[in-house]
Image (cartoon, helix red, strand yellow):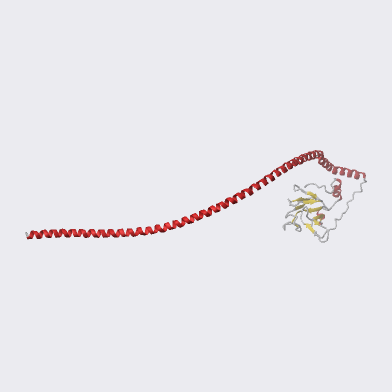
Amino acid sequence: AAQRECAAQANRSEAFNGDLRALRLSVEQLQMESGQHKSLLDVHTIEIENLKRADEECARFRADLQRWQREMQDELAKLRAEHHEEARYSREHLERHAHEIDRMRAERQDDARAMAAVNESIGQVRADLQDLAGKVAGIPGQIKKLRDEMPRIAARAAREVMEGMPRPEPVQPTLQPPACPPEVSEEAYAVLSNGQGELHELPDLRNVVGRAPNCNVCINGSQQISNKHASVDFNSEGRVFIKDLGSRNGTFLNDHRIPQDGGIVLQSGDAVRLGADGPTYVFEYGPAYYARWPRDPERIQDRYYTGGVKGNRGRS
């Protein structure tokens, strides 16, 4: 019985020890949970403090916002007052502008009536001009016809005078060429001189006059002269022709502009102007011309008997 009692005591002791261990585990678990709750409580405390500070910030912001709102209301009231003043000023100006526009419209109507009267006067003037143009339209044709008849009339008068004169005995005169300045070379077919010491020789049968250095007659004293201004050519019979080479300012023979579509006969003593306001030179035959084409009375006589008066040149 004692052994059984001891065994029962041992069993109870083991059961008590198991309960004690379970209790210890429960206590440890409660301690762990208490630590967790404490940590959570600390977090909540920190969050509460943060919320308090945020609430204080919100209160300050709300106060600032209310202050800003009052300031904006004051500024808005000021702007409304200024807007009313500007509107009143604009209305006054618009009224003045409306009166000014009405006045300008009335003036424009007066101007339109005056312009209509001017246009009517212009129409009358145009009608008068057209009538006058119709009256003078035939004058250029009559002048041209008269100019065309002049050489024929002059030639007929010259023939009548010469036929009435006794013919001299045919002799072969010896005519000396006119003396050239001593500075003119023997190879010059002609010269261009201005009477002030300026002299330019024409050394070839075909000569180009201009400012360019490659022209055989280089005249660079005036901006009126083009690089290649004009040409002066001698044909096989000794006739001389001058032609404009598309110059910028034109070439003039005895104050008449030379057209660019052909050459004009050039004779000794003619005046040649290079450009509308350019220099003027007198064309004269040179020693080489008289050496190659001796002057004979028949050619000189033919020049005047055929009505070839100065200023009436033939085309090349």
Residue extending furthest toward the left: 1
Q: Position of residue 237 (x, y in %)?
A: 80, 50
The N terminus: image quadrant = bottom left
In the image, is residue 92 above or below residue 179?
A: above
Location of residue 112 in the rendering, given as x and y in whole percent from the top left corner: 73, 41
Query: Residue drawn at (16%, 59%), measured in percent from left and top?
Result: 16
Q: Which of 134 and 265 is in front in this view?
A: 134
Q: Residue at x 85, y 43 (%)?
A: 150
Residue 151 on image: x %, y %: 85, 44
Q: Which residue is drawn at 22% across and 59% down?
A: 25
Q: From where the camera sits, is residue 189 visible? A: no
> Where is residue 37 drawn, in percent x and y?
30, 58
Q: Place residue 207 in its image quadrant.
A: bottom right
Q: Is 100 left or right of 74, judged from the image as shown?
A: right
Residue 210: image quadrant is bottom right
For the image shown, how many numbered marks are present on the structure?
0
Question: Image check: 170 left or right of 104?
Answer: right
Relative to 10, 203 lies left or right: right
Q: Can the viewer see residue 5 in this picture?
A: yes
Going 32% across and 60% down the picture, which residue do you hit?
39
